[in-house]
Amino acid sequence: MLRLRPEHRLRRLVVGAKTFASGEDGLLRRRQHRVETVYHCAAFKHVPIVETNCIEGVRNNVLGTWTIAEAAHECGVKTFVLISSDKAVRPANVMGATKRWAELIVKHFATLSGGEGVNFSTVRFGNVIGSSGSVVPLFKEQIAAGGPVTLTHNEMTRFFMSVREAAELIIQASALSKPGDILLLEMGDPVRIRDLAHDMINLAGLTVRDEENPNGDIEILTIGAREGEKLHEELVYDPSGIQRTRHPKILRAKPVNGFIVEVPGQLSAMFARVEAGDEVAVRQMLFDFPVHREDRAIERQLRTAEV
C-alpha cells in the first residue's frame, strides 16, 4: 500500500482572485508552495447583482482571471482550469459577458504557452443544485414560510447538476483537457423551473394552490423576468462542433481560434475604463469584441439553417 510522507501530502490553498498575484512577495510564496494545479472558481455569479454593479463585476471576474492566469503562467503551474458558466454562451447579461471574457483570457494564455508548460483549459456547465444563488434554496425557504413560490417566467428552463457530480467531473475533465480546450459537462435535458417548483412543493408533502386546486397549500406566482435574465441557457454556440471525449459525460466544444491575439490590447483598454469608473464604456466593451460579433454571426447562421 502506498503511503504518503508528510512532505508529499496534498496541500490546498484558497486565495482571492484579485490578491493572488500581489507583487514579488506573492510570486515567491506561490513558488514556495509549489502549486501544480489551479482551479479558478472565484467569481461574482449572481446575475442581477453583477448587472447593477458592472465595474466590480469586471474587476473581479475579468481582471481577477487575468491576474491568476498570468501568475500561473509566470510560476509554471502545470494545470490551470477555469470554471465557467453556460451564461457565457451568447451572453445577455454582464455576468455572462465577464465569464466569456474569462474564457478568452484562458485561451490567450494557452496560446501564449504554445502547448508547453501550463495546460490552460476551461470547464463550462450549468447550475449546481443548492449552491449560493441557486433557485433550490430559495424555493425551500418560500415553501417553509408557507409561500408563495416565485418564478420569473412560466417557461424558463435551466440545466442542473449536483455538487458532487460537478466536482468529480471538473477534476476528471482537467485530466482529459488539452491546452485551450473548452470542455462541457453533460447536463442532461434542461429543467422547466415551474415543474421544479411544483415537484418541490409535492416533495414537502404539500399541494399547489391554483385554479384546478383552489384549496391547495402553496401558490406559484410569476413575477416577471429580471434584467439580463435569459429564458433558456445553452452550453455551446455551435452544437454541430461538439466532440466526444473518453468520458461519456465530458464533451469538447469547437475551438475558438480567431481574435485571441487582440485580447491583451482590448483588456488593457477595458481595465483603463474600469479604473476611470466609466461604466457606459465598460459595458460597451464587454459586449463589442470581435469574437462576440463572430458568435452572433454564427447564431444568425444557425437560425437561418433552422428555417
Image (cartoon, rainbow, N blue to C red):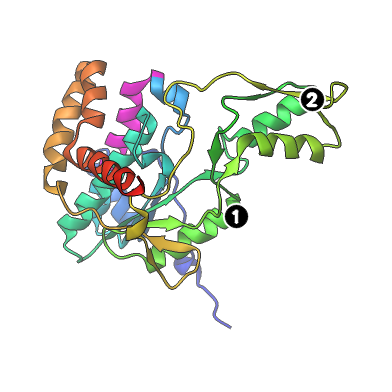
The residue positioned 26% from the left and 17% from the top of the image is 279
Quadrant for the N terminus in the image: bottom right
Estimate how packed mark 1 is, as few (under 14), some (14 to 19) or many (20 or more) residues with alpha carbons within 10 Å: few
* Element class at badge 1: helix
> Is residue 227 found left or right of 208 in the rendered image?
left
Examine the rendered structure and indicate whether residue 138 appears above or below residue 5: above
For the residue pair 300 and 258, the one nearer the viewer reads as 300
Q: Position of residue 21 (x, y in %)?
A: 27, 41
Q: Position of residue 167 (x, y in %)?
A: 53, 55
The residue positioned 31% from the left and 51% from the top of the image is 30
Residue furthest bottom in the image: 1
Task: Kindly check if marks 1 and 2 are in contact, taking CB atoms under 8 A apart as contact.
Answer: no
Q: Position of residue 144 (x, y in %)?
A: 79, 27
Quadrant for the C terminus in the image: top left
Pick whichever of labels 1 and 2 is earlier in the sequence.
1
State the residue position of label 2. 218
Name the magenta segment's main secondary structure: helix
> Separation of disc 1 and disc 2 at Cα?
30 Å
Residue furthest front in the image: 307
- What stretch of residues is rendered in magenta? 52-66
Q: Position of residue 220 (x, y in %)?
A: 71, 25
Numbered badge on residue 278:
none
Residue 60 falls inside the magenta stretch:
yes
- Tell me the amino acid under the disc marked 1: Arg
Residue 128 falls inside the magenta stretch:
no
Is residue 35 visible to the viewer in this orientation of the structure? no
State the residue position of label 1. 164
The residue positioned 24% from the left and 39% from the top of the image is 292
For the residue pair 238 and 111, the one nearer the viewer reads as 238
- Tell me the amino acid under the disc marked 2: Ile
